[in-house]
Amino acid sequence: MSLEPGPKPQPSPLACLIVEDDAGFASLEARVVREAGGEPHGCATLREAARALAERRFDVVLLDNHLPDGRAFDWYDTLCRRDPHLPVVMITGLPDLAQAVSLTRNGLFDYLVKPVDAATLAAVIERVRRRRPPAPGGSETPVWGETPAMRTVREQLAAAARHRITTVLLTGESGTGKEVAARELHRLSFGARAGEAPFVAVNCAAVPGEMFEAELFGAERGAYTGAERRRAGMVEAAQGGTLFLDEIGEVPLPQQAKLLRFLEAREFRALGGTEARVFTGRLVAATNRDLRAEVAGGRFREDLLYRLEVCTVRLPPLRERREDIPALVEQVLAGLARRYERAAPWVRPEDLARLQRHHFPGNIRELRNILERSLLRTLGESRWLVLDPTGLEPEAPELESAGSPPPAGPPTPGGEDEPLPPERAGLTLLEAQEYRLIRRTLREAHGGIRRAAARLGLSPQALLRRLEKWPELREDRSA
């Protein structure tokens, strides 16, 4: 019987129902769906759409609002009752802000205003794919985010992947995703062979000092009391792949010397053995400690630190990348929903804002725990996540200056009826809401960037990037 692993399960194509009576625009939608690896199904009326939904399951619906047999806005409640968790994207050439707000509050995935280009449609399809649970037995693709800090991480991992002989040190607080980064480096390093090449993770903090050498390098028969047969170590198991030494700052000083020799020569010898073997894989280490401070305190060898610091990648804490939280929430909820065999609920905008204001001392691990607790509190048929508030406290805001009063808290909803400038009439519903929120918050903060950013749950740099995208808001700030 073959012990070789079978092929990995592949996700089925994203099934997309396109409800559109404009043949030209429907053709554009179908092309975007196909280019994204999806499977488009088209119909031109609400009646045809209802029949298609009765016959099979879809992953997303692109729904024109004005159709020959009625308005999709009036049919939306019926669609929701059929499948409360089906992502629906409403597309219209006659935008109605009150209608858009009503739909979004009732779980609409997005609201787009024609003309809609291929890039916008592709971005929507990608968002749908991201919240879709992975295939059974498959693995989730990590969400890296688009903050400058995470773009730097991706670039550093890609550069390190080109040189397998380079030892890579991942640093960062607990829960920032160091093992996820190590697995991504493994994927980048081995490409199409990543699934075949071994990835062996060693939690150095969990290995007893007296067993460290045997666990890592293996042991010959009789090497120690009770060693009745030869034992392969973690290094041998990782040959041709990646050896991930997690929590390397926890290795006791006596064992650090053995680790240093291995890192320098890339050779290892089993405990009690005489034959030296060459390690042909990639070495990745991680720590949540300040190793330079450990060296200064006499708890870590300086020469080992120099050997590890050849290529260092810092994983930023979640509070430095708050803009990535919505995408992380989508992915984590999709994975948890698959684990508990249920549909992923939606997250209310005010709950998402509260998560973005939280300090997250436990980083992504803490976010996952909050979402798992919340999911267990949420009834299976509920469309909305019941957020568990345990431990959720807003981050203490930074003051604009020593004499400035603290911000009054997060901005409250409202102001949806204030018109957008003509040049912003094509914004999606969510973009329009963000635009109005920033404009109102800047006015309430009397133009103070740091105060406004704290109230919005953003860093000042993140708010300034939005002001670069919408330069007219600077005028409001100046006023």
Image (tube, rainbow, N blue to C red):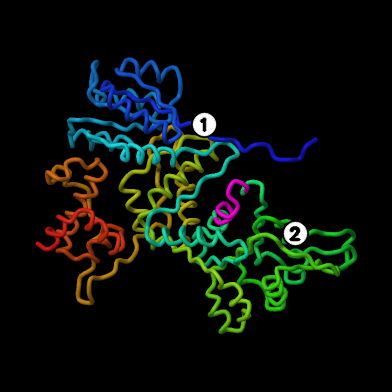
Taking 432 as reference, is 126 left or right?
A: right
Numbered range of the magenta stretch = 185-193
- Mark 2 vs 1, N-terminal side: 1
Query: Is 52 above or below relative to 268?
Result: above
Tell me residue 277's x, y (percent). Answer: 78, 65
- Specify the quadrant of the image occupied by residue 318: bottom left
- Amino acid carrying mark 2 in the image: Glu
Where disc 2 sits, the SS reads helix
Q: Rounded to the nearest whole Å, what is the CA distance between mark 2 and mark 1? A: 37 Å
State yes or no: residue 51 in magenta.
no
Q: Residues within 10 Å of mark 1 (few under 14, many from 20)?
A: few
Looking at the image, residue 217 lies above or below residue 3: below
The residue labelled by disc 1 is 12
- The x and y percentages for residue 455 are 26, 60
- The tally of labels here is 2
Packing grade of label 2 (10 A; few <14, some 14-19, many >=20) is many
Q: Residue at x 25, y 70 (%)?
A: 399
Q: Point out residue 252 in the picture as x, y percentages from the top left corner.
A: 68, 75
The C terminus: image quadrant: bottom left
Residue situated in front as seen by the camera: 425 or 442: 425
Q: Where is residue 259? Give x, y as percent.
A: 69, 72
Toward which corner of the image does residue 321 lie, by quadrant?
bottom left
Which residue is label 2 attached to? 236
User: Could you say which quadrant of the image residue 255 lies in?
Assistant: bottom right
Whether residue 273 can be seen here: yes
Residue pictured at 49% horizontal, 52% vertical: 369
Which of the pair 332/127 is nearer the observer? 127
Q: Is residue 359 visible?
A: no
- Secondary element at image label 1: loop
Residue depicted at x 90% and y 65%: 222
Q: Main secondary structure of the magenta part?
A: helix
Q: Amino acid at mark 1?
A: Ser
